[in-house]
Image: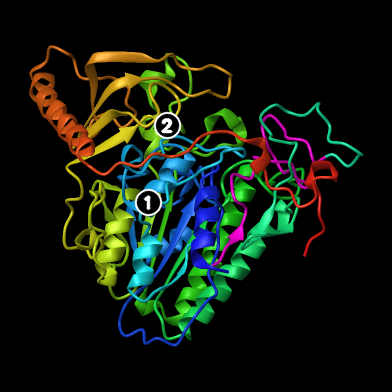
Amino acid sequence: MAWLSLKVLLVGLSFLGCLYPLVDFSFSGETRGQKPNFVIILADDMGWGDLGANWAGTKDTANLDKMAAEGMRFVDFHAAASTCSPSRAALLTGRLGLRNGVTHNFAVTSVGGLPLNETTLAEVLRGAGYVTGMIGFDYYFGVPYSHDMGCTDTPGYNHPPCPACPRGDRPSRNLERDCYSDVALPLYENLNIVEQPVNLSTLAQKYAEKATQFIRQASTSGRPFLLYVGLAHMHVPLAGTPPSAGPGSLRPYSAGLREMDRLVGRIKDTVDLAGKNNTFLWFTGDNGPWAQKCELAGSVGPFTGLWQARRGGSPSKQTTWEGGHRVPALAYWPGRVPVNVTSAALLSVLDIFPTVLALAGAPLPGGRRFDGLDVSQELFGRAQTGHRALFHPNSGAAGEDGALQTVRLERYKAFYVTGGARACDGSVGPERRHERPLIFDLEADLAEAAPLAGGSAEYRAVLPRVAAALAGALDDIARDRVSRADYSQDPSVRPCCDPRRPACRCPAA
């Protein structure tokens, strides 16, 4: 299959919500030399407090906790947005949504995706001799969008529950409004649908098998490799069998978290056996937990966004409160990344792009600006600097999509717009615009409970610095090469292997 045609389709499809991708199995005999391999694992909707190494109350991440003890843990690490598509587009490009064009989620019927004139991490590494397992380039295996965007015969846990696919002569029209149920979830291999509806209960196992197979084959190919694994965990619906009744039984979220942890552990074990001293493994998340899902949502830890919580709505996913974008993050590279170190450097998913390229000895693409930093010195324990400023875009709760409405400047965080996403109780925090921003001191107030007094000397000292940082970022974006994404809707683009069958059913390959 021609690489360009795969890119056109799969990069276009890859942001219909959250892409859950796997690997590339095309290899050649080029000499690797000493270029490092990269494995990037991205969890979905995982809360900062879901990692046991972050939050003592969590007991479900034994493998990830072991990775933290054998590597570096980042406690002030942030997604580039607080919802799926813009966060993942930023990982691929090292650029905020206002630059790369992806400012909010795509849907099943979206025609476009990541603009084709954007240059991705995998494209640059291919030019540096890498074989890439980042889907949408050489090979694709996975679900092309969030696994709640369609029906399945194994619907798992959801709140409100999504029904299974209909089996009659025609699809039912009495289904949950937000389940996209008139098309079944497809599992793709390249451009072919190999299973529809996908079996969610076996998807994690399939991903683990493909990932480990890729690492083993790539390790003997003579070429360095990039493997990107975008997990379905911990997005709803949560796969798994009903928990057993009685004392000690796991709630569905804990069971799902343990399944994800085992999957990551299996990938790490494969890396170790294949030659861990030359492979850098980076684990992080795309945004915070989806509080609307109640008991099926993760933990934000101490980042409870109390100012917003008192006014209604959720201060988690889809918001710029810390619970929406502060995510767990681990780096593992024996012999290079220090062991059992906690870093408080201010870092971002945006940093993955320039850091990986620097470690691979590949140049940044020309003709555009980047929002991430090369943080290899932080990874190797030689610096604790990171960013001086980060800019958090609106991701659906309040304000214009993609707008830089919140500024992190060192220990301070300034909100020009506040609002809450839909909470478990159904409430939605109202949008409020602040001509004089609310400013919180995160070192003293992790819960974002009480902003600095507007008349205080501290507020007056911080305000002009925040305003200057934001003005500088907006001016830089205005002078940059900016892309535009296509969010138009067309029901005919819904993937269906057999449109004559209810819910687009087809047998497994």
User: Residue at left 69%, top 29%?
Assistant: 160
Label 1 CA crowd tier, 10 Å (few <14, some 14–19, many 20+): few
Q: Residue furthest right?
A: 169
Q: Which disc, if any, is residue 73?
A: none
In the rendered view, does 234 fall on the left or right side of 323? right
Color theme of the render: rainbow
In the rendered view, does 173 fall on the left or right side of 316? right
In this orientation, which residue lies closer to the viewer: 404 or 254? 404
Q: Which disc, if any, is residue 395?
A: 2
Percent across and percent down for residue 155 are: 74, 43
Which type of secondary structure does the marked residue at label 2 adopt? loop
Answer whether residue 174 is visible to the viewer in this image.
yes
Identify the magenta region: 139-165
Percent across and percent down for residue 462 are: 12, 26
Which quadrant of the view contains residue 120? bottom left
Which type of secondary structure does the marked residue at label 1 adopt? loop
Amino acid type at mark 1: Asn
Would you name the residue on which mark 1 appears?
117
User: Residue at left 53%, top 61%?
Assistant: 5
Percent across and percent down for residue 436 are: 20, 15
Magenta span has 164?
yes
User: Residue at left 24%, top 31%?
Assistant: 407
Label 2 CA crowd tier, 10 Å (few <14, some 14–19, many 20+): many
User: Residue at left 16%, top 51%?
Assistant: 385
